[in-house]
Image (cartoon, rainbow, N blue to C red):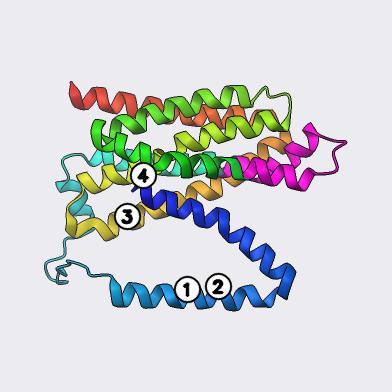
């Protein structure tokens, strides 16, 4: 899961850079053709090279989703993972809409706002790329749930200095550390789902989880833009940290109740 996270982050970093370079050199239409060609190559590679050990479930034997949830021994844990996915995605998206504006407010007389804002925006991805493999090994050793709990707590703490930063470079530093921690959050939640869901329900459960992730992206963007409009940019970091703290407390109480 962590390796997949690394691959996705690398794509998010490299894609805009390549797209910007291609559009500057050849115009806006060429990147669309190249992207379509790359997607077609991905289709061919998946179709011809990926071998799947899969036994389809007939429609007659497929249980309704409600019954599957009732049969799960840890249905509360599954729901908590849905909420965790939503909050983690929301915490990422709440900051993204204001990064450029916040950097501009921190460096009003700089002539390189776009470049510095791009660096600040990219630092979490760089941290994730560097740490994902190591956090994946840690997850295999100590368990995904422990990594997720500690990751949420450390991410909450990292938002405290981001609320009081003096300059853009400090913001880049703390966001880099946040990216290191974020490498274990969504992969840990997905690993917990995998370990607690029967194979015949994987597709539907992960589709629900994807829906919660999409909801988190919407709520995060709205949260960041609304709070920054009503108050200040610093309040966005404070509110995001509070949501992660609430998520950590939910995880902690859930773990204690299951171990009691």
Q: Residue furthest right?
A: 109
In the rendering, which numbered label is found on residue 39? 1
Q: Determine contact: label 2, label 1, CB under 8 Å.
A: yes
- What is the distance, in whole Å, between disc 4 and disc 1 at their CAs? 24 Å
Is residue 15 among the parts visible in the rendering? Answer: yes
Q: Quadrant of the C terminus?
A: top left
Left or right: 112 as drawn, with respect to 197: right
Tell me if mark 1 has few (under 14), some (14-19) or many (20+) residues whose alpha carbon lies within 10 angstroms of its own: few
Give the percent coordinates (x, y) of residue 226: 67, 40
In the rendering, which numbered label is found on residue 91? none
Q: Determine contact: label 1, label 3, CB under 8 Å.
A: no
- Mark 1 vs 3, N-terminal side: 1
SS at circle 2: helix
- Between tags 2 and 4, which lies in front? 2
- Between tags 4 and 3, which lies in front? 4
SS at circle 4: helix
Q: Which residue is mark 4?
A: 187
Q: Which residue is mark 2?
A: 35
């Amino acid at each position: 899961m962590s390796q997949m996270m690394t691959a996705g982050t690398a794509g998010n970093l490299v894609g805009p850079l390549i797209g910007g370079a291609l559009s500057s050199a050849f115009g806006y239409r060429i990147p669309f053709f190249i992207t379509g060609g790359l997607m077609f190559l991905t289709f061919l590679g998946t179709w011809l090279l990926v071998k799947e050990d899969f036994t389809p479930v007939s429609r007659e034997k497929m249980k309704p989703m409600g019954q599957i949830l009732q049969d799960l021994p840890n249905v509360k844990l599954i729901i908590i993972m849905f909420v965790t996915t939503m909050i983690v995605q929301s915490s990422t998206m709440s900051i993204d809409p204001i990064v450029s504006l916040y950097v501009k407010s921190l460096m009003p007389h700089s002539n390189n706002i776009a470049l510095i804002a791009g660096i600040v925006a990219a630092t979490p991805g760089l941290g994730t790329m560097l740490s994902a493999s190591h956090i994946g090994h840690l997850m295999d050793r100590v368990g995904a749930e422990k990594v997720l709990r500690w990751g949420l707590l450390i991410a909450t703490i990292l938002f405290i200095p981001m609320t009081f930063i003096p300059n853009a470079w400090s913001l880049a530093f703390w966001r880099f550390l946040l990216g290191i921690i974020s490498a274990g959050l969504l992969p840990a939640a997905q690993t917990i789902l995998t370990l607690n869901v029967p194979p015949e329900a994987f597709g539907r459960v992960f589709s629900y989880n994807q829906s919660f992730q999409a909801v988190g992206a919407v709520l995060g963007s709205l949260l960041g833009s609304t709070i920054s409009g009503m108050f200040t940019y610093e309040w966005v970091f404070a509110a995001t940290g509070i949501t992660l703290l609430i998520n950590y407390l939910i995880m902690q109480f859930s773990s204690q109740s299951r171990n009691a």
